[in-house]
Amino acid sequence: MARLTLSDIHKSFGSTEVLKGISLDVANGEFLSLVGSSGCGKSTLLRIISGLETPDRGTIEIDGKAMTALAPKARGVAMVFQDYALYPHMTVAQNMAMPLIMARLPFHARLPGMKWLTPHLAPLRAEMAGQVEQVAQQLHIDHLLERRPAQLSGGQRQRVALGRALVRNPTLFLMDEPLSNLDAKLRVKVRTEIVDLHRASGLTFVYVTHDQVEAMTMSDRVALLQAGTLLQVAPPATLYAEPQSIDVAKFIGSPEINLLPVCAEPEGLRLGATLLPLSHGFKPGTDLIVGLRPEALRLSAPGLAQLRPAEGPELQLDMVQASIEDLGSEIVVHGAVAALPDIALRIRAQKSLQSGVHKIALPERLSLHAPMATAVIFDINGKRLDPQSVARRQEALA
Amino acid sequence: MSHITAPQSVALTAKLRQTLGQIRPAHVVVTLVLFIGAWLMIFPYIWMVSSSLKPAAEVYDADFSIIPKTFAGVKNYSDVLFGQPYPRFMLNSLIVCVGILAVQLLTAVPAAYALAKFRFRGSAILLGTVIACLTIPINVTSIPIYLGLVKVGLLDTYMSMMFPFFVSVFAIFLFRQFFRGFPDSIIDAARVDGMTEIEIVLRLILPAALPAIAAFSVFSFVSHWNDLYWPLIVVQSQDKMTATLSMMQYQSEFDTNYGRSFAAATVVTIPMLLVFLFARRAFIRGITMSGVKG
Ligand SMILES: Nc1ncnc2c1ncn2[C@@H]1O[C@H](COP(=O)(O)OP(=O)(O)O)[C@@H](O)[C@H]1O
Ligand SMILES: [Mg+2]
């Protein structure tokens, strides 16, 4: 149980600045995911939290206690590594016991052969073995205790690594892409197991991943890191619906959000050569970027069911279809804006059961509708415009 | 089965033909070359053993034969084993070799770990120095070291016999290369688990580096067992004489008993033969890793 506070963490390797002032608060018992593309500094930040790396500037506090200058073992944190980092020539039981041995036994009692020379420590050793056993049962690896890492499957190694981290009752649980070496099916399974573990233990988790699906499904809050700065820290749903910048909007969500560069004009929004008639309330001449999630777009084409008219102002677009991905439960249509072929468009639509096994056929030219209420609007610098002021402006017009 | 039925014999000839068909001219050539090479290597040993069984006069006999005409083996070998404090020589060799190896491992392992896994100012220069030192032969340093040992009055001691070899740059370099392959994440996990750096070396790195350490140990042991050069310089009394050095005892200006010298040489090489038999894999690895023949 611990609250983690990072303030203004900076870190450079040589001349490259990897972390450029990270401030972050993780509440007691929270599951926070640190997500970002490869090489953006996630592992570095995690290593700074664990004490394996020292920041150039900034402080780390756990439960209000300064940790910045402390060695990893003094911080009471546990860490799970991407490649599991099990001790290769030790058994599973020895691997899991290691943090306990290091924390509880004095140096001389840890030397080889001292087991027989320090009989007074036998009860302590038995207690530690019992703890290992208990955690092993919890993780369903108690039948593997005498094996060596080389004799385990990937999923089993993963569990041993979790067990080794759990056994010492850490205050803070750090994980660095723990699922990326597992196959897809196992990944989903272990994902839920980790979430269950978090719920059962009530510990504070900081979970690093480059996979937005993991971040979105597992966490209480997601911190999005890009090029050494935190773009946004928010619950998954907020991050998806209310991205504060184009970078966030682009990173979160698959297929990627549609971004339309438009210019406000008195009668509507100009997209390339065409004018999309719409009452919007922006000052004429303002350049904007309209973000539309693929599932916010609705298709209308000859032969498809008529769309119910939307409430409020609606954006209408013509699209040239390029390809259709049939994912079973839904389809993703890829194409380009008819007026501006450089702009790629993605549409996600639920597939009705009636369409059955037939190959989906759509005409090449499609007409799209998107209620403005679902749009996320950014200024030309990629910063989100305050949605309330946008709404107010539209209400004033209506 | 004494009667081979017809189909079986057909099968046998077919098999024979197949085996013969697999023999390629290239294989014949390779086998021949290896055979000649092996013979060149082994012949001196056979000569040594053969000569060790002959009286001195026969060793230089014009018509050489492998089987001695006069068998003097018992006399030669008993002279070597019992005519001098031979167990003492063996013990001296053992003390020197084990002492050298122990200190070499003690110095090389931590140095190699630091060079392999720590980033610190000057680490590249230190590594460069280590590599540069690999090129300095003992002959260059032996005179200053000898003079130094004379100054401190350590000549003719075990210390003087071992001292120049306490730090093996070769071991540092070899171990560093080996340690570098050890995953950083495991070392990090150990640090988070609370291991000190010394414990990381003892508990994690050493067990993983056992093949390299075994190989180096055999290499170091054999080369110092066989070393004639340095003991010849610093040993003055029979008391500190090593087994290899003791072979020189039989060479004097007036009377060199070559039969006995060969017997001594045979006895001295036997421990190495045993090392080779028991640690053959480590031995071969040591030679291939170092690229040096001991
Ligand atoms: N020890 C190091 N020395 C030099 N550069 C490093 C070191 N560790 C990380 N980096 C660099 O810092 C950047 C961020 O690395 P990392 O934190 O591992 O990224 P991520 O985990 O997000 O993929 C990378 O460009 C990497 O090359
Ligand atoms: Mg990483």
Image: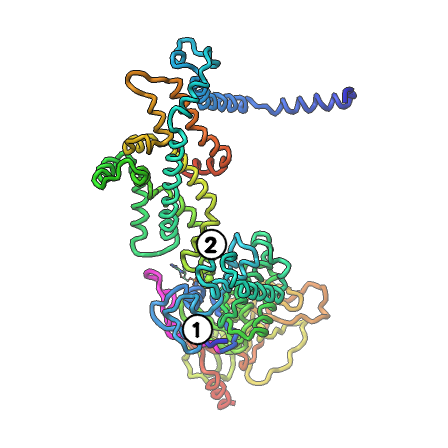
- The residue beneath circle 2 is B203
User: Is disc 2 in contact with disc 1, using a CB cutoff of under 8 Å?
Assistant: no
| Crowd tier of the residue under label 1, counting other residues whose Cα lies within 10 Å: few below 14, some 14–19, many 20 or above | some
Viewer-nearest residue: A157 or B70: B70
> Magenta segment range?
A6-27
Left or right: A166, with B222 as reference point: right
Q: Amino acid at mark 2?
A: Arg
Compared to B201, does A126 lie above or below? below
Q: Quadrant location of residue B45?
A: top left
Q: Position of residue A38 (x, y in %)?
A: 46, 62
Asked which secondary structure carries label 2, the reply is helix
Q: Taking the image as drawn, is residue A337 in sight?
A: no
Compared to B139, does B190 lie above or below? below
Q: Position of residue A181 (x, y in %)?
A: 55, 58
Q: Quadrant location of residue B272?
A: top left
Magenta span main SS = strand
Q: Position of residue B142 (x, y in %)?
A: 26, 36
Asked which secondary structure carries label 1, the reply is strand
Q: Taking the image as drawn, is residue A222 in sight?
A: yes
Viewer-nearest residue: B288 or A235: B288
User: Which numbered disc covers residue A231?
Assistant: 1
Residue plotted at (50% across, 62% down) = A101
Q: Quadrant of the N terminus of chain B?
A: top right
Do the residues marked 2 and 1 share a common chain? no
Give the letter of the chain under mark 1.
Answer: A
Q: Quadrant location of residue A328?
A: bottom right
Viewer-nearest residue: A305 or A275: A305
Q: Amino acid at mark 1?
A: Leu
